[in-house]
Amino acid sequence: MPSHVRSDFKAHPDWKGIPFPNIHDFDPMEWGEQFVYERFEDFVKRNGGLISGGSGGNLEEKSITNFWDTNNYTGSNPDISLESGRIGLAEYTNINFVSMNTIFAEEFLSDGNPSNDIYHHPYPRKSSTNVQQYLDGVLHPEVVIGEDNVPDTSFYIAKTGDGEQINHFLKPSYLSSYV
């Protein structure tokens, strides 16, 4: 779950429409299960069979924590995610995926100091994608055949650098270009 790995627990109450003025006042143990899941979590819960295999971390070192975090990702070396077995699953996700409150977070720093923003993660950056082509109106839609064999024509933003290249990184909505 990108929002878990990226410390974006604010996404849960946001998704359920729960006012959440101060992240520091939050106690997830007071929530019922109905408040815990966001849209992507619902999808994963319904489609668990889509997740299989994979490896992460330095598995030669049999520490369970190395599966998640090997302390090899420094926040400034995203291409380490291209080196097999060098980083853990949380590090890989943090470099290559976004969550609702961390997407292109580099643009939302209030004072330019990332340590003052609990949601700041340096990657993936807007410049790591082709989103500007979409905003400029030069990106063409793609046809993708779904699991139900129904073609879906849509725009897809690709992650083109700073770690893994992901062709279908984001799917903008009809109003995305106006936002």
Image: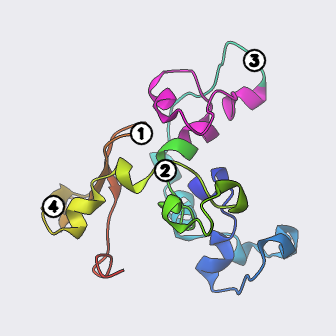
Earlier-in-chain disc, 4 versus 3: 3
Relative depth, front residue between 104 and 109: 109
Relative depth, front residue between 10 and 114: 114
x then y, percent, for residue 99: 54, 61
Earlier-in-chain disc, 1 versus 2: 2
Tag 4 residue? 139
In the image, which disc is placed on residue 97?
Answer: 2
Earlier-in-chain disc, 3 versus 2: 3
58 horizontally vs 95: left or right: right
Specify the amino acid type for callout 2. Phe
Q: Secondary structure at mark 2?
A: loop
Tally the marks: 4
In the image, which disc is placed on residue 108?
Answer: none
Is the Cβ of the residue at disc 1 closer than 8 Å to that at disc 4? no
x then y, percent, for residue 34: 70, 77
Q: Secondary structure at mark 1?
A: loop
Is the Cβ of the residue at disc 2 closer than 8 Å to that at disc 4? no
43 horizontally vs 61: left or right: left
x then y, percent, for residue 71: 70, 29
Answer whether residue 90 is magenta in the image.
Answer: yes
Earlier-in-chain disc, 2 versus 4: 2
| Of the two numbered discs 2 and 4 in the rendering, the one whose residue sits closer to the viewer | 4
Above or below for 165 versus 42: above
User: Magenta residues?
Assistant: 64-93
Tag 1 residue? 162
Specify the amino acid type for callout 4. Leu
